Amino acid sequence: MSASPLLVDVVVLGANGAFGRTLAGLLHAGGHRVTGVDLAPAAVEQAPLARYVAGDATSPSAQVRESLSRADVVLASLHEDVALASLGAVLPALKPGALFVDTLSIKSPLAARVASARDDVEQLGLNPLFGPSVGFTGQNVAAVSARRGPRTDAMLALVESWGARVTVLSPEEHDRAMAAIQVATHAALVSFGAALHGLGFRVEALRQLTTPPHRLMLAALARLVTGNPEVYWEIQHSNPFAPEARRALQDGVERVRDVTAAGDVEAWRGLLGDCRQALGSEAEAFAALCAELFRRV
């Protein structure tokens, strides 16, 4: 398979990370010349790279800068603090017209920094809304195109060719949406886990009594707590709309408390009605999905 002429040379910063390896593999399979950069002295075993350069993105060596200077695309698959710290060294090395891509969960701070530093490079933020082990096929990817051009369009088309559903948003639209989709969801799961701990609940002792909804919640909680804590911390700590999402979650718990304490069944029906309203026209579809999942657990 041949790569788009706009995306031939790609540098992946953080090439030894889980998503860095996934992206490098897809790019390599598509015929792109992929240079991996990471701190380790060597690439991880079987890394699909044309070239590997050991280096620090926040303080790149001459060899790393040379790779950056000829790249059509620089893809930063880094944690937020490292990605932001690297901009001062990485952006000046890019050739005019190059595309800088990040995979952060929060877009507004980085987008603003890149826009103020370089007005002659394209900028694209990708947020794969799934773990790297899941793969892109059939999954959602949020895209933030702060400065769009031909390489951006080619990169978006490439991600769609991997089977992903791509939605393009502004940085603020992205972060507001992720406050509901990621911040509130993860906070609810962590609160659920903390409640189980506080209640002295032990799954191994009571698993035979669990219900399908409870098992689904346990499965989602287990995936979260066995994942990378820094990823979930970044989502909770860095999203500028996270406090609003957590307040809304707390308000919901307090409504449940107040309605049940008052013994007001009509208020309870109203609360469930509000929940259904949030689902909108998708309520029946998600109810069917839930029934399917219940049969599997």
Image: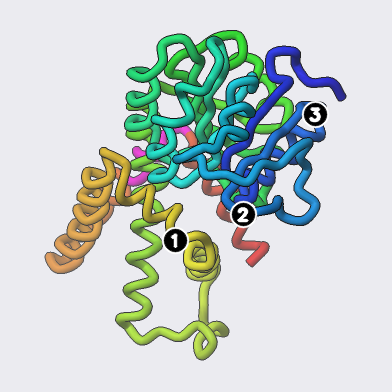
Quarter-of-image position of residue 155: top right
- Which residue is rendered at x = 41% and y = 34% of the image? 280
Is 296 magenta? The answer is no
Relative to the observer, which residue lies in front, 45 or 246?
A: 45
Cα separation between marks 2 and 1: 21 Å
Question: Is any part of residue 266 visible from this angle?
Answer: no
Labelled disc at residue 294 = none
Q: How busy is the neighbourhood of tag 2: few (under 14 within 10 Å), some, or many (20 plus)?
A: some
- Which residue is rendered at x = 82% and y = 27% of the image? 31
Image quarter hosting the N terminus = top right
Relative to the observer, which residue lies in front, 146 or 157?
A: 146
Indicate which disc, 2 or 3, sits on the residue closer to the N terminus.
Answer: 3
Q: Secondary structure at mark 1?
A: helix
Cα separation between marks 2 and 3: 25 Å
Question: Is any part of residue 282 visible from this angle?
Answer: yes
Indicate which disc, 2 or 1, sits on the residue closer to the N terminus.
Answer: 2
Type of residue at label 3?
Gly
The residue indicated by pointer 3 is: 30
CB within 8 Å, label 1 to label 3 = no
Question: Is label 2 or label 3 in front?
Answer: 2
Residue extending furthest toward the left: 262
Residue extending furthest toward the right: 1
The percent coordinates of residue 34 (x first, y second) are 72, 33
Indicate which disc, 1 or 3, sits on the residue closer to the N terminus.
Answer: 3
Q: Which residues are magenta?
A: 275-281
Image quarter hosting the C terminus = bottom right
Type of residue at label 1?
Pro
Labelled disc at residue 40 = 2
The residue indicated by pointer 1 is: 229
